[in-house]
Amino acid sequence: MDNSPDPTPRPDRDRRPPGACGAAFDRDPRGPGADAAPDRSRHLSATDGAGDRRDSRRRRTTVVALGAIAVASAAGLAAGLLTWAPAAPEPARPLTPAEAERLAAVRVTNHRDVRSGLRITIGTAAARTDVVGWVDWSRPLAYVDVGGPGAGRGRGLVQATPGLLMARPDPTAVPAPASPPMVPPVDGWRVADGDAARPLRPTLDLLFALAAPRTEPAGAIPAGTARWLARAEAGRQPVDVLQAPLPDDAGRQGPHEAPEAGRPATSTPRTASHPAGPTGPPTASPPRAGIAGWPGPAVSLPAAAARPAGTALLDGAARWWIDRDTRLHRLEGRLPGGVPVTVELQRANRPVLWPVAALGGRAGLPRALTEPEEDRLARAAARMRAAGGAAATFTAPVAPGVTLRGTGWVSWTERAAYLSVGARDAPAGRTLRRYDAAGVWSAPYAGDALVAPPLPPPRAGHTWERGRTGVDDVDVLLAAALRVGSATRPPRSATRIRGDRLADRTVDVIEVDAQPVRLRYWIDKTGLLRRLELRTRLGTYAQLDLVPGRAPALPSPVPPAREPGR
């Protein structure tokens, strides 16, 4: 018998550890009856097939349901679009008491806010004029840049008060206006003539009428003429759009009171000291009694010109965009003649404005003189006499489109002045003028008014005429300059307007009562007079700039036999 081990492993003993025996290792791992069980792999395959079929049916059901939802949504949207209509706006209605109070307080709110940025549109299409800048209702003063296709000759910078409009034309400027420079240019300003002022004057009158020192009185807006129109947004704030005319007193009052320096304007009429003739311009108002602490007023801007009583500023009612704080953000209306105008106020854009020299210059804080300032003012006359004289130049805006200029000398030793005077655009009106205590000699002059006159005053070929001083503003200014150097005592009353700089020197601007006029002395720290300012009949300021020093001899232009009293 072959007892060698069988080389072929048996299944039931396959992979059995050596020495392992027993029932635990003889048992079939599939369990009892495993040979009789069906094939497990075929069972799993059948189960997987059934699951796939169920998932496929579920996906188809989901897709069908989503499609049905989409179709239903589209149908509902289409039906809604076909039948939807916007909600009807609130109808116009009379003002509530609260809205009427806000409308009545708009102008006093502007007055209290003092300043605002602005953008104005006048007219439409090719006739449109655009205005960008600022308004100061407390002085009052507007400083704007004018442009747009309809601006024409009026394109450029403008500074205006209720009575005057100073323009600095710039025909080469780009059509679209921009914010004006904060410090206005020194030269090139003149009183605007009719062509430049006509499009702007009604709009600026409207702008100044949007402020008042008190709320509107009862009945200022007739009952039934004001209505609420809509809700809107302006300046990132909710506003109510109201329709109402300007208050009855706007544009239907006499001359405005000119504001004193550093003091708000009021609408109280005041009688002029020298009423204008039938065709003459308005004149300055008389000074009022001084206030304790500083003697006498100091007018910083020209007095307003009177508008004819009953003149309407707008043709019909305006639309007002007013917020909850009674601040006006926008106004739309029509100027007389049907010209549309839109005023947009930029309430956060409110810098301090700097008037040009012809309107009085930078604002100050008027006060009484200190002791050193009084001493310098008292010594000014003696200091000028010690200097002997001064080279003099002057600028005087005396009429629309006309600015007189002159160059020459003032001699306090001889008590005489001699200058060439004329307007750059009016050669026919140039003259030579010699002033002394007896009056003024004048003769036509063909030379340049910005060049010193010939010395000695020419006699041959010139017809000299004797006149009295005070005929025009230049005469008044030069006569006042001669009196400054001959004064033996200081002025009766004086007010320091502000500190300033002139020709790189620090000066005090002091307004004095030099009856019958008021003058401004620009005195440096040594007590020398550097500028003399006069309020003209037109309401502008004329300046005589002085460079103290020895003046040449200024003999009379006529033989002694022709002198008065000889």
Image (cartoon, rainbow, N blue to C red):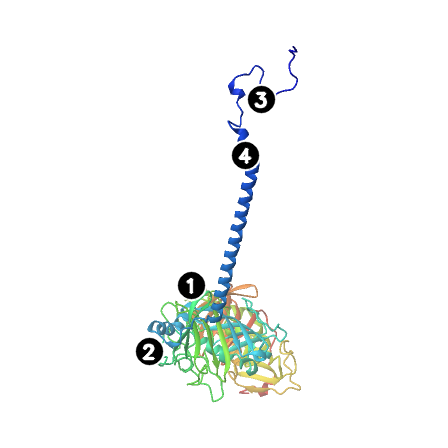
Q: Which of marks 4 and 3 is nearer the N terminus?
A: 3
Q: Nearer the viewer, mark 4 or mark 3?
A: 4
Q: Say which of 251 and 305 sits in front.
A: 251
Q: Quadrant of residue 86?
A: bottom left
Mark 4: which secondary structure? loop
Q: In which quarter of the image is residue 564?
A: bottom right
- Residue at the disc numbered 4: 38
Residue at screen point 66% across, 17% down? 7
Mark 3: which secondary structure? helix
Q: What residue type is labelled 3?
A: Asp
Q: Earlier in the sequence, mark 2 or mark 4?
A: 4
Q: Nearer the viewer, mark 2 or mark 3?
A: 3
- Residue at the disc numbered 1: 371
Q: Which amino acid does label 2 sit on?
A: Ala
How far apart are labels 2 and 4 at the CA level? 108 Å
Residue 351 appears in the rendering:
no
Give the quarter of the figure containing the C terminus: bottom right
Residue 365 spot, x, y in % from top left: 44, 66
How far apart are labels 1 and 3 at the CA level? 133 Å
Q: How crowded is mark 2: few (under 14 residues within 10 Å), some or many (20 or more)?
A: few
Q: Earlier in the sequence, mark 2 or mark 3?
A: 3
Q: Say which of 214 and 461 sits in front.
A: 214
Mark 2: which secondary structure? loop
